[in-house]
Every structure is written in C-alpha cells, then in structure tokens.
Image (cartoon, rainbow, N blue to C red):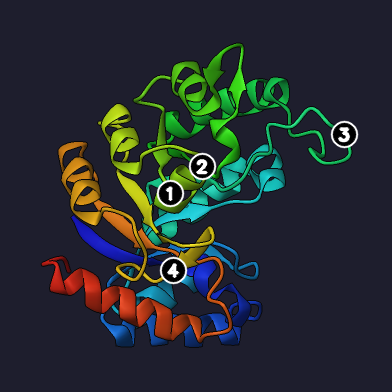
Amino acid sequence: MRIGAQMYTTRGTCQTLEGFADTLKRIADIGYRYVQVSGTCPYEGQWLKDELDKNGLTCVLTHIPVPRLENELDQVIADHDIFGCRNVGLGWWAFDDNPETGKGMTWDKWMETFPSIADRLHAAGKYFMYHNHDQEFKRLGGKVILEKLAETVPAEKMGFTLDTFWVQAGGGDPAQWLEKLSGRIPCIHLKDYAYGRSMAVVGEGNINWGRVFEKAEQGGTEYMLVEQDDCHGEDPIECLRRSYQYLTACGFE
C-alpha cells in the first residue's frame, strides 16, 4: 500500500492555479508521491498533468462536484484520461429528506442519479468511488445506508473511499468496515479521531491503526490518502508532514 495526500486538507491554498501549483510542490517536498485532487479551483486536464509531472506526483483519485458528474461527465472522463487517473469520486451526499437541510440530496435522488453515472464511468474504464461521512450510518428500512449503497451498484462499478474518522464518528469500527467492503476499497482516507470528536494528525489520535492497516491490505487497498478537514489553526502542510512521518515510521511510503 502507498501513502498519499488528500488535497482537501490544503484547499485553502488551492483556490487559484498559482496557489494550487505551489501546494503541489510543497506536498511533493514532504515526500508524498500520490495525491487526491479535491476542493481546488477549476483546472484543465493538461494543466494538472503538467504540474503533477513537474513534481513527480500521480493523481490516484478525484472528487468531482455533482453538477459536473451530472452534466459534464464526458469531459470529466477525458480530463482523467489526460492526467492518468482511474478513480472518480463523489465526496458528499446528505441522505436527508428535509428540503431545508438536505438540499434535495435524498436516497431516491441518489438512486436516480449515480448508478447510471457509475455505469458510464465503468464503460470508459474508470471506477466510481463513494466517500462516506457519518450520515451513511443512519438507518433506512432497518439497514445502515453504507450497507444499502454497497448493494445498489455492483462492486466492479463502484468502490468506497472509506474515511476512518467518519466511520468512527458514525458509531462504526473502521477496521470492521474495511473488512466488510473488501475488494472495493482501492483508496481510503486516513484521518485520526481524537477526544471530543476532533480530527487529528494520523498517529496523534485514538484510532487503532494496526487493525486499519491490516484490514486495508487484506481488502486490496492500494492508496491510503491522508486527509484532515480541520487542522485547528495549524498549517495544513505541517499536519500532512507529521502524518507522513508517522506513516513512514510504520513502514509505508
């Protein structure tokens, strides 16, 4: 398994192409060789390829805004072909029937929209990846939503970017869910869980990383991507650096 950086961590410095390019360099300078592109300003596929190549980086996963998945999927596929990324991700869905809080992101709307997108991506040689938060641990019809999602689309057409922090926040066991989703977790998010439901640098919280690493490897994980949505006022690059140091000390690279 390889380690990488989820650029949502550094989204604050990636809202212009100049800042995005500089952030890629700073991530590479830490030692990371793999990234997920998410939360950045818009970019063209060739621009991203050039910047990745310049810094010796490979993009292994993206999160694409819902409107682009719905309305610009052919261009999304073409861009991913240019910078050589197979995994195309959806980063958020509310699963909330309340029109005020859910903004139309209901279970029925998900079913109307994303199985067909997964089909089109699969036909183009891409893999649709769903990223969980804690709301997927609500129950619909007596079943946890994350489990229902796994049943709606075949494993060969949809995988899961399982997020260790959000599984634990939802009341689940990250290692157990990695085992349940074995075979469809090529990329996962590493985010530590500290007292007070607080996000932490990997290795500075309370998640049992030994079990996570064991079940991820057994389940076929290729890339473990460090993400820290909230760095509590610290420099996100410094947080990524400390996570990198912990993971390399565990033998990963």
**Considering the image in quadrants, where does the N terminus appear?**
bottom left
Residue 86 percent across, percent down from the top left: 37, 47
Q: Nearer the viewer, residue 211 or 19?
A: 211
Q: Which residue is mark 2?
A: 132
Mark 2 touches mark 3? (CB < 8 Å): no
What is the CA distance from the residue labelled 4 to the residue labelled 1?
13 Å
Of discs 4 and 3, which sits in the foreground? 4
Callout 1 environment at 10 Å: few (<14), some (14 to 19), or many (20+)? Answer: many
What is the CA distance from the residue labelled 4 to the residue labelled 3?
32 Å
Compare marks 2 and 4 and give the one earlier in the sequence.
2
Q: At 58% from the left edge and 51% from the top edge, which residue is drawn?
A: 64
Q: Nearer the viewer, residue 240 or 70?
A: 240
Residue 232 percent across, percent down from the top left: 56, 77
**Considering the image in quadrants, where does the C terminus appear?**
bottom left
Mark 1 touches mark 2? (CB < 8 Å): yes
Q: Which residue is mark 4?
A: 200
Disc 1 marks a residue whose amino acid type is Asp
Q: Which residue is mark 3?
A: 99
Compare marks 1 and 3 and give the one earlier in the sequence.
3
Disc 4 marks a residue whose amino acid type is Ala
Q: Which residue is mark 1?
A: 163
Disc 2 marks a residue whose amino acid type is Asn
